[in-house]
Image (cartoon, coloured by chain):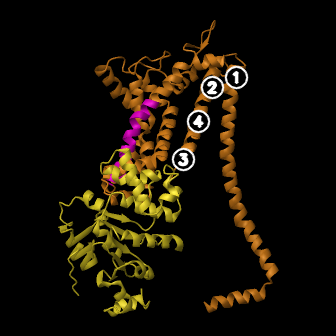
Amino acid sequence: MVLTYTNEIFDINDLNLWYADHHALKSIHFPIIKKEVTAIIGPSGCGKSTFIKTLNLMIKMVPNVKMSGEINYNGKNILNSKMDLVELRKNVGMVFQKGNPFPQSIFDNVAYGPRIHGITKRKHLEEIVIKALMDVALWDEVKDRLNAPALGLSGGQQQRLCIARALATKPDVILMDEPTSALDPISTLAIEELILELKEKYTIVIVTHNMQQAARVSDKTAFFLMGELIELDETSKIFSKPEDERTEGYITGRFG
Amino acid sequence: MTYFRGVIFFMEKLVPAKERLLKSQKNWMNGEVRGKIIVFICAIIMISATIAITIFLGTKGLQSFIKNGVSLIEFLTGKQWNPSDQAKPQYGALPFIFGSFTVTFLAALIAAPLGIGGAIFMTEIAPSWGRKILQPVIELLVGIPSVVYGFIGLTVLVPFIRVHFGGLGFSLLSGMIVLSIMILPTITTIATDAMSSLPKTLREGSYALGATRWQTIRKVLIPAAIPSLLTAIVLGMARAFGEALAVQMVIGNVKTMPHSILDASGTLTTIITLNMGYTTFGSPENNILWSMGLLLLIMSFAFILLIRYLSSRRKI
């Protein structure tokens, strides 16, 4: 299966990854299209979290990781050792399983990214923070308490704050690693609606355990199994008539 | 499994429920209560020892003010220390109070950055080999007795300061250096625990936004750990405040107020250890030493309260 697109932001070629001796990703070819939501599904341990962490090289925080192949981001191979991690992560934001705001004020949390990238003017920071909070529909809930500690927010609000924090560095890709797995259904719904809105401006890659979620929010869905990319296609196709029987087995709940 | 169920069934048949309950109560008497009593006694002994020391120190320490008519204000603010003068004894302990505080703060000033720096090195910069080297070094520092610290200070530090900085060598500076090395392990150990107990998600969150390691340490990790780091410093200071032997060997033990860091000085602890042998129990000179002991106890309570307050402010 070879898909070719012209408007891809990530183009991954023959990506292999080892944790010491464990071959965790096996020869992955994976194009990611601009301003689309790409969902990654698969059973636990299939490599989907590992894969998403390679896209902003957060995987480098894990000791004993070896990689080969190419991850072309806007035509530049980020596996090249000269890659500027700061610049990459500024452009490829990430949201984690559980909202992880810093133990600082709401304002400082969102302003953290712009500040470390050199913006110091209060006015400029305020503009960025307000815009980011509006983009995640959190502004109305927190506008009166921007200086309150972020850890006082509810779980769902914390997660939206973390998305705002990621947006504040003006990325063009947002990676989400099971962003709703620790949230209640209502907060989950809010995040999903947010994903559909953010799609207008950002490219989103989301790892999820929840297949309904993948079906609801994504344009493309990829199915990983045992470190291999089994199938990548339009979400509607994956969930109606997948080409591979293993994909079908997984989405119909026969295993995984 | 079926065999086991059978046995239980058999026992239920054989012994009526009432008796089984009574029997289990007996078992409870044997093990539970005995353990409870032992633990209870341990706690009682610890608590009563603390209370007894506090009461004893309180009554002894207050005697010089109540029985011997020493003015509390003179004790806390007077600069003249001459308790053995028969005609006109003077009980101004301010130089020692000042000496104790100064040497403590100066020691913390050196040990805090070193200790916290070491902790960051061990947890953030080189968690594998850094810890392997620094951990035993710190444990070794803890194990060295204070008399050895004092001896080294006396033989190496005091002459060095005399030659290179002037003065007698016996000085606040020597005391502060010796003390800072002695409290370094306390600060480093607690600071290391504080840093390594920070959740991994904080680091990830910062790195994922493109922060460098130093930015992450300075802007996320240290602010998040600050209440615990302050606790580490205060605990180190409490140790420094109470340390007597090593300080006594290098600080000079004079009765006058130090005017520079190179001047000899005295602290509450060193004056107690030096003079307790020469005074008779119950005499005013002896009682005033107890008052200084009481002051040390009050200070350690103050340090404990401060630590309690700081840890209640911990955010994570």
Disc nearer the start of the sequence (2/1):
1
Q: Position of residue A245 (x, y in %)?
A: 34, 93
- Residue under the point 29% across and 82% down: A229
Tell me the SS state at disc 1: helix
Mark 2 touches mark 1? (CB < 8 Å): yes
How packed mark 2 is, by other alpha carbons closer than 10 Å (few <14, some 14-19, many 20 or more), is many
Tell me the SS state at disc 4: helix
Residue B135 part of the magenta segment: no
Task: Work out whether residue B126 can be spotted.
Answer: yes
What residue is shown with label 2?
B290
Disc nearer the start of the sequence (2/4):
2
How packed mark 1 is, by other alpha carbons closer than 10 Å (few <14, some 14-19, many 20 or more), is many
Q: Chain of mark 4?
A: B
Q: Position of residue B42 (x, y in %)?
A: 66, 51
* Numbered disc in front, either 3 or 1: 3
What residue is shown with label 3?
B311
